[in-house]
Amino acid sequence: MVESSILSRSLTYARINFEGLVLSLPFLVLPVGGKVLVWSIILNVILFLYKRKWVNCYDFFTFSNRLFYLVLFYAIHIIGLIWTRNFDNANFELVQKLTFLICPIVYYSFRNELNQHKRITLYLFLIGIFSMLLYCFINGFYTVWIAHTVLLHPGGYFPYYNEFCTAIHVSYFSLYVSLAIFIALLEFEKSSHLKTRFLWIFLILFFFSGIYYLSSKGAWLALALTAIVYLIRLFFIKKQFRFVLIGGSVIAGMLLFLTLKNNPRLLYFKEIWVELKHPDKINPEYSSDQNNGQRIYSLLSSIDIWKAHPYFGVGTGDALDSLYFTYHKRNLVELEKKKLNSHNQFASTAIQFGLLGLFSLLSLFFALFYESVKHRQFLICAFALLCFINMLFESMLCAQAGILFFALWYSWFHSVTKQDSN
């Protein structure tokens, strides 16, 4: 009887760990993206069906649950079919954003298992980011060494962002790495052993160097602002004045490094500032860094469309068509030729669904900040800030890399904090 009981407990433990590994797999392969990530989510769905978790889905729709906000955002895309004209684009949107429907339901159903394996999920995500970033360093520097061309960095042979990162868009990979930095920072706070702390310091510096070479303007700004919030948290809530001093010195040192030798990556910010101060001098056809002026005109065109359809937008599938038509009407030839989107998620949502969509999108961030304050979970706050700022510079929920990142982490945070409220 004793041996049978031990065997039964062992099998139960192995089953729970297997389920936790399957549920955490998408976070490991998130930086890889593509079909690998899609298949990892399909495995989650297969596990959901096999375990008959749909039986408990009634709770998801009846009890107060902020995970439902993501499903509601997807539902608005379905409702938008009523007044859309381009059903091909609309169907593509619905398929592309299907994870907004899948992830909340699946992760809510497995919330107990996710809570038991939450540290494993975080560590697998860090392993995935570290592996992809290491590949970027090897590939980037090897490419430059083979090419024997001096690129942007004035100090020698250094890779430009499109040579440093070839597997995924730099803006979204920078977002992933930024979140990994704050996960590592929080783990550093918890660690007590000297060797473990040195490991976390190494990872933080490695991730910071990755952010530098990825050269995403939005990521730099998002990381800086979130770091300031992190220091404020340490000072006023944690009362860890030593960490505030060290962290402030590190941030100041990094900013000083960026300004040394007239760093070309910092020139992007100077160009944007000049163009914002003198918008009448912007040439959308020949912008100084070839996209700043164009993005500004793209945003202005998006606002014009929203003004024409303020409440319900143009529909699920007509956003890009309306934008291209506005480019043509305003004689923005380069923007029309490049088929440039809004490069601002709030503007993209406003075009599609007007105030209805904007309210739904902002409610997602309200839910995140509420959970962060309620459960005193800074990582949720960091995720929300990073995504919010990224959405000011990219149409994040119009690209698969942004959709999957947001859907996975949003669903995971709300599922875990529900069980970890104490």
Image: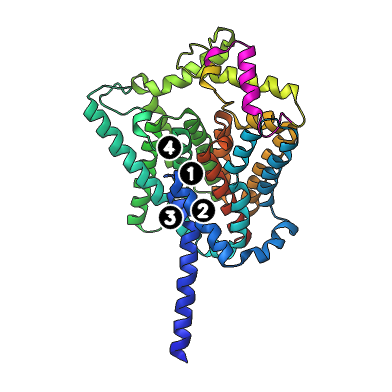
Q: Secondary structure at mark 2?
A: helix
Q: Real-space Cα distance between discs 1 and 2? A: 21 Å
Residue depicted at x 34% and y 33%: 164
Q: Secondary structure at mark 3?
A: helix
Q: Real-space Cα distance between discs 3 and 2? A: 18 Å
Mark 2 lies on residue:
41
Q: Earlier in the sequence, mark 3 or mark 1?
A: 3
Q: Secondary structure at mark 1?
A: helix
Q: Earlier in the sequence, mark 1 or mark 2?
A: 2
State whether residue 77 is above or below residue 29: above
Kindly report which numbered mark, 1 or 4, lies closer to the viewer in this rendering.
Answer: 4
Determine if the magenta segment contains residue 150.
Answer: no
Task: Give amino acid for label 1.
Answer: Leu
Q: Earlier in the sequence, mark 4 or mark 3?
A: 3
Please state if 297 lies on the left or on the right of 131 as rendered: right
Please state if 41 lies on the left or on the right of 87 as rendered: left
Residue depicted at x 31% and y 38%: 137
Residue 422: x and y in percent read 62, 62
Determine if the magenta segment contains residue 316.
Answer: yes
Task: Tell me if label 1 and label 4 are in contact, CB under 8 Å.
Answer: no
Mark 4 lies on residue:
168
Residue 73: x and y in percent read 68, 43
Task: Give amino acid for label 2.
Answer: Ile
- Of 244 and 36, nearer the camera is 36
Please state if 133 lies on the left or on the right of 357 as rendered: left
Tell me the tag on residue 179: 1
Kindly report which numbered mark, 4 or 3, lies closer to the viewer in this rendering.
Answer: 4
Magenta residues span: 313-334
Tag 1: Cα neighbours inside 10 Å, few (<14), some, or many (≥20)? Answer: many
Q: Earlier in the sequence, mark 3 or mark 2?
A: 2
Mark 3 lies on residue:
123
Kindly report which numbered mark, 3 or 2, lies closer to the viewer in this rendering.
Answer: 2
